[in-house]
Amino acid sequence: MNLSVNELKQVANQIRQDVVVMVHAAKSGHPGGSLSAADIMAQLYFNEMNVDPMDPKKADRDRFVLSKGHAAPVAYATLARRGYFDPEELIHLRKTGHMLQGHPNMNYVPGIDMSTGSLGQGISAAVGMALASKLDQANYRTYALLGDGELNEGLVWEALMSASHYKLNNLTAIVDYNGLQIDGPNEEVMGIKPLDKKFESFGWHVITVDGHDFDALAKAFKEAKATLDRPTVLIANTVKGKGVSFMENQASWHGTAPNQEQLEQAISELGGAK
């Protein structure tokens, strides 16, 4: 697809509305880090990745791994709006007997390439996918979205080291760098700065980008594809809870569901009417 910036903004806004509706209906879930990643997901699925909702398992499709698996609502909303399944299914998030569980399951959800949830394991799986593409002499690319709090996991850095060793130029990682995790600010829980220098020291090409700027994201993904000697990471500066005033930059909304009044306010701010 080739959507304009205005069209992408509309898609991302719809994804955000879906997220708050889903989490409210489930009475549990993770809205903060889903809202921060909505623009990244819209850019990936609607303008960047080679995917076909009518053929979710096609051999040459680009792969995507949601390494921060708790942000499943943003993945589900994106897949639904891209045409992988009926958006009406979104309201059944975390409901027994339905496919959209609290973390992505590749066995039940069309478009999910890897089951995730245990932090750090998603990027490891993505490294394996990118390496498999090389070994098979295939052309597909692999993308992985990580949370910044997830970078506290040692397993992440083993995976990053492997990706660099094998020169996986077909792998692009994106860090949803919103500065907050479940227990508070990253730098209070376990500091990760200077993040760019850390990735560079592990042999990655680093691009720092505004994760809410579609033009900047498009340019960054283009640069990643043109980097032929190493994997690339986009350190995407984002706002946790983006688009909903009372959720923005609040760690408390990492894993809290809005009540009815909060839902109505959120939808109103996002320009919707549900």
Image (cartoon, rainbow, N blue to C red):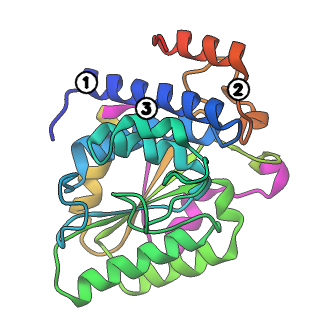
Residue at 61% over, 64% down: 117
116 up-or-down from 165: above or below: above
Going by the numbered disc 1, the residue's amino acid type is Glu
Please name the residue that numbered disc 1 is placed on: 7
Which circle's residue, 1 or 2, is located before the other in the chain? 1
Label at residue 258: 2
User: Distance from label 2 to label 3 (Cα)?
Assistant: 16 Å
The location of residue 134, given as percent across then percent down, is 25, 84
Per the rendered image, the range of residues in magenta is 187-214
Does residue 68 appear anywhere in the picture? yes
Q: Nearer the viewer, mark 3 or mark 1?
A: 3
In-front residue for pair 191/243: 243
Residue at 73% over, 22% down: 259
Mark 3, Cα crowd under 10 Å, few <14 / some 14-19 / many 20+, is: many
Residue 264 left/right relative to 254? left
Helix, strand or loop for disc 2: loop
The location of residue 253, given as percent across then percent down, is 73, 34
Label at residue 15: 3
25 up-or-down from 182: above or below: above
In-front residue for pair 130/83: 83
Helix, strand or loop for disc 3: helix
